[in-house]
Amino acid sequence: MSSAAAMGPPDPATMSREDQTLVLLARLMEGGQEDDETIRDLDALTKLFHDDLEAVKKGEPSICTVIDGDCVDTLVCYLDMRQEEKLRGHATLTTSAYLKAAGEDGNQKLDQFFRERIRRGTYDDYIVAFCVAAVIFPIVPDLTSGLFLSEGFLSSLGPLMRRKWKSRKVETACLEMLNAACMNAACREAVQKYCADWLEEIVDQDPEEAVKEMRAGEVQEGSVSMRRHSVHVQNLAAVVLAKLRCNHSPNRARKPNRGFKRRIRALRT
């Protein structure tokens, strides 16, 4: 065994802050670790970002200069709903710390990530983009609302949600994003304008027909071969509609339909 191998991995205490950052990001990019190991790396990265704020005040260069778009992509993909909830929680703290340390540069990289994922338009890209938007909305509301209100984005969600072959995960991620967006008045108005009709269609879906299709073997829950919206998706749509109606002008709000009332009652029981 060589002396280098016997020494093991380098001691972080002997490494520069930039090198520590790159080593942690490299491990996160590589993947294949146990969740506890990934969480440990995320927490170490969070501390580096927090410490970076003080270091920059003392005139030291920011570690954020070594972080490129691929690094940001790796980091925010841990916010994906398909990750373990505990892992997502730690990744949220790391993402928040990064955005605070990186400032405008971090916002620009996040903007590029979101737009590129939406441009690709695969189910996987939609899931990741929507999950990231839902999580970061409270962290950087100005940035996220700007992306959310960009021309053509909200109007593109209707055709996606009305596709014949449905993905529960895409629909869930989309609705969780809309749910988070309702915290912003301008976004809420835009959701009312562009999404209320298809949200009502989801809520109004006849549950008896859905049961018949499941018994006939025409529905595979969670896959892209679903022809109807899942009950979970219907409930989420009802929550978004409830938020729209609670904050909407009484003169402009539409009368709740039976499907909407049924979903709200189900959520309360």
Image: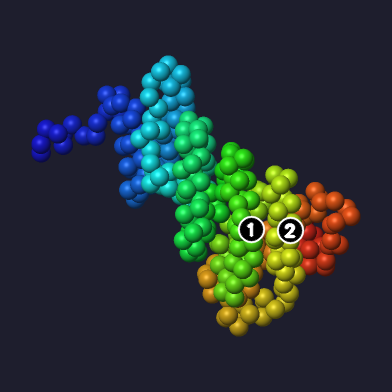
Number of other residues with Cα within 10 Å of mark 2, as a class: few under 14, some 14 to 19, many 20 or more:
few
At label 1, the amino acid type is: Leu
At label 2, the amino acid type is: Lys
- Vertical arrangement, residue 6 with respect to residue 197, above or below: above
Residue 128, x across and y down, in percent: 50, 54
Q: How many marks?
A: 2
Which residue is at the far bottom? Answer: 216
In the rendered image, is residue 33 in sight? Answer: no
SS under mark 1: helix
- Vertical arrangement, residue 72 with respect to residue 210, above or below: above
Residue in the image at 21% along x and 34% along y: 8
Residue 105, x across and y down, in percent: 46, 36
Residue in the image at 49% along x and 41% along y: 108
* Cα distance between the residues tagged 1 and 2: 9 Å
In which quadrant is the C terminus drawn?
bottom right
In which quadrant is the N terminus drawn?
top left
Q: Nearer the viewer, residue 227 or 152?
A: 152
SS under mark 2: helix
Q: Quadrant of residue 238?
A: bottom right
Q: Which residue is mark 2?
A: 193
Tell whether label 2 touches label 1 (CB within 8 Å). yes
Residue in the image at 67% along x and 66% along y: 231
Which residue is at the far top? Answer: 58
Residue in the image at 80% along x and 54% along y: 245
Q: Which residue is mark 1?
A: 154
Residue 45, x across and y down, in percent: 41, 34
Q: Mark 2 or mark 1, which is nearer the start of the sequence? A: 1
Number of other residues with Cα within 10 Å of mark 1, as a class: few under 14, some 14 to 19, many 20 or more:
some
